[in-house]
Amino acid sequence: MIAIVDYGRGNLRSVEKGFQKVGIEACVITEPRAIDNASALVLPGVGAFRDCMSNLENMNLTEAVIRSVQKGKPFLGICLGLQVLFTESEEFGICRGLGILAGRVKKFQAGLKVPHMGWNTVDIVRKPPVFDGIHDRSFFYFVHSYYVAPLDSDVIAATTDYGVTFASMVWKDNILATQFHPEKSQETGLRILRNFGALARKG
């Protein structure tokens, strides 16, 4: 089972429907035990970084998410679910993240229209398994005002340009996370969900 973590700040139903469209079983969960029992984990998210971290903590989900990643289970973070993997965010003052990856979440520079919303291209730096069948510079759908700046550039799998070249996807071991929304990116995005489902089946 793929567990989609519900911490009160995610676009859960669209993610769940995306998996359904490609024939992959995925269930929305709210309990730490369900995360422990899942074969793979999806952490979606929209909204403020601080609210996300607060809700994860208040629902006793933080340690379960970290434990799942450390056990090597396939992990897919989406949008805010990518950002909270990192050390900290400067959104509304410095806020600590999960600290699974080193780096900071930064605001787009002044003069740019934010949020960065709509379709943009993704340049593949290192091609992860979830990008099987996806071409370089494919278009994906974005909605975000902040972006991740990893300390280790080796975790960057893809980049996108919006006033600055930022990491639009990271990949390290079992961790895959996108700044864009696969579930809103039509057939190309659904292919990512299908490929992630295949990874989950392999364990």
Image (spheres, rainbow, N blue to C red):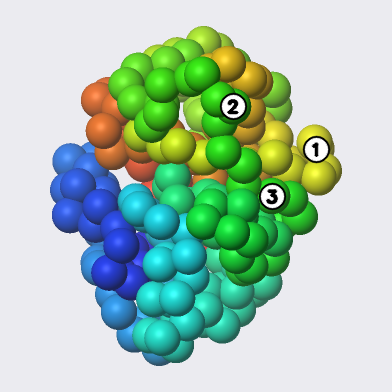
- Say which of 58 and 43 sits in front: 58
Tell me whether circle 1 and circle 2 mark residues in contact (CB < 8 Å).
Answer: no
The structure residue drawn at horizontal position 63% and vertical position 32%, both measured from the top left corner, is 167
Give the image location of residue 34, x and y in percent.
36, 82
Indicate the amino acid at tag 3.
Answer: Arg
Residue topped by disc 1: 154
Residue topped by disc 2: 109
Residue 174 picture quarter: bottom right
Neighbor class of circle 2 (other Cα within 10 Å; few <14, some 14-19, many 20+) is: few
**Circle number at residue 104:** 3
| Relative vertical location of residue 4 with respect to residue 68 in this rendering, above or below | above
**In the displayed structure, does residue 116 sit left or right of residue 23?**
right
Between marks 1 and 3 in the image, the one whose residue lies nearer the viewer? 3
The structure residue drawn at horizontal position 52% and vertical position 79%, both measured from the top left corner, is 62
Tell me whether circle 3 and circle 2 mark residues in contact (CB < 8 Å).
Answer: no
State how far apart marks 1 and 2 are (Cα): 24 Å
Indicate the amino acid at tag 1.
Answer: Asp
State how far apart marks 3 and 2 are (Cα): 15 Å
Neighbor class of circle 1 (other Cα within 10 Å; few <14, some 14-19, many 20+) is: few
